[in-house]
Image (tube, helix red, strand yellow):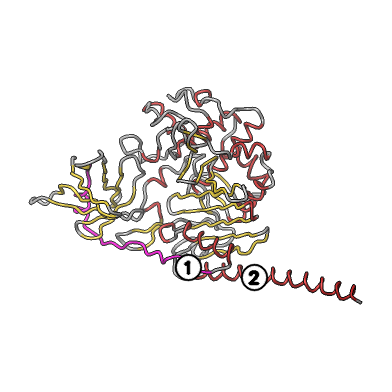
Amino acid sequence: MFREVLYTLSWILILSICAISVAAAQTKQQQLITLFDTLSNRQNFNGCVLISDQGEVLLQSAYGIGRAGTQRRLTNESRFEIGSITKAFTAIAIMQLKEKGLLQYDDSLTRFLPELPFPRVTIKHLLSNISGIEEFLSWTEGEIDMSASQSNASIIGTLSEKKTQPSFVPGQGFHYSNTNYLLLASIIEIVSNIPFEEYLSRNIFKPCGMQNTSVGARHKRSLSLEYAYDYSWDGSQNRLVQTDSLKRYPKFMSGIKGAYGIFTTSSDLFRWVQALSDYKLVSAATFNEAMTPSFIKDGTMVAEVSPGIPYAAGWSIIPDDSGSNNMFSSGIYGGYTSLVVRNSSRERTVILLSNSNETTDLMGVMNHVDEILESERLSFPDLVRPKRGISLPEKQLRGYSGKYRAIKGASDELCIVFANNHLYGKFNHFMEQNLFPESENVLFANEAESKLIFKSGSDGNVLGFTLTGSGIERYFEKVR
């Protein structure tokens, strides 16, 4: 009798545990649905999401438009450009070639591209962003033809002509640069003797079952109905517009391979993460070796994309208490923004893809996703409201064009260009940003909290501006 009661109680306990687990999973699932429904209704998320926890997909859904002016909405099979997440694919290709003995991490860059003036830079330096090679996306009109579509070959040709030396001794500093991964893609083509896109298709996409993934320049080929066009905020019209009509670099830099340029879906990215977890593309030993962050500064510091977040092979690494290396990879290009989080200690994957980045804060959204998955606590990010501006006559906009230099402190410079009826500002060696008028003498950028307050002379000509915001106030004088 006692034995039968014990047996019955055991089954009740097991069934109760199962019921609690299912209820918890449903609670998390419903909270995730509520989170993204709310973000979509706020117009703070236009894109696709896939969230898997403990090996179970809790949410896969699409929100918003795929192309403005049509009735076409996004679906789970919509294709997005994933920006710098491409770097993690490029790194896997390098690992595969290394595993086959076709290259070594300490091989010099000039072994493959002898025309470049970087004999001390190695493949490992490129993988870890510790080469010191300049960022090609920061080049100005004087360094690159902004009317022509660029390619890996044209960028390499310019690097060879400029002969600009690395900003630090290779291996002794960290500087995130898309140039590093452009060079790795070219090495892949030289070693494999096939185009980069073909190498990835044969050796990564097909083995992973990624049937809706490809490499290529945006808008350069016949686009499927599932193509998700990208949109950016125009602060002079106060509305989202197709990115290519507003920003310059996405169009003429879209032919670059290796640093960005992969188009894919949330489903295909999930297949890729699963293949990485199963070591389907390279062995565990090869993968773990590449994912070990490099030491810099004579071995006293780790190469980090931000404090406490080491960088390796296209991923930012977040060590946890269990010793597992959890990681994420993110990307921004044009109006696209993307995030893949791989939490191996919890068998968790989060994939977020958006085609309107200035109305969406993916990192902020991820914090709330993590809160749900960790503690089943639902909360919402702050409402994202793009800055609003005004329209000004072309003559007045042209008056802001010129070169400005800080009169105190560091020799910071800002160049403002008027082109395509828009203003573009480039600060030092950073990539240019759109500038929009808030009033007749104030400009702002979507990506920064700062404002530029301009001062004009009695003749109406601009003399300079005061940079304010984030506790900063500095005056820049117009020098040209």
Residue lying farthest to the right in this orientation: 1
Q: What element carries label 1?
A: loop
Please tell me whether residue 200 is drawn above or below residue 420 in the rendered image: above
Marked residue nearer the N-terminal end (1 or 2): 2
Quadrant including the C terminus: top left
Q: In the image, what residue occupies the spot 63% across and 59% down?
A: 52
Please state which amino acid type lies under the numbered disc 1.
Phe
Give the labeled residue for mark 1.
Answer: 380
Instruction: Name the kind of residue labelled 2 in the image.
Output: Gln
Q: Which stretch did the figure color magenta?
A: 378-405
- Foreground residue among 353 and 251: 353
Seen in the picture, residue 434 relative to 237 is either above or below; the reply is above
**SS at mark 2 in the image:** helix
Q: Is residue 154 visible?
A: no
Direction left: furthest residue: 458
The picture quadrant where one finds residue 144 is top left
Q: Magenta part mainly helix, strand or loop? A: loop
> Dot 2: few (<14), some (14–19), or many (≥20) neighbours within 10 Å?
few
Q: Mark 2 points at which residue?
A: 26
Quick check: marks 1 and 2 in contact, CB under 8 Å? no
| Residue 352 inside the magenta-drawn segment | no
Locate residue 5, reporting x and y percent: 86, 76
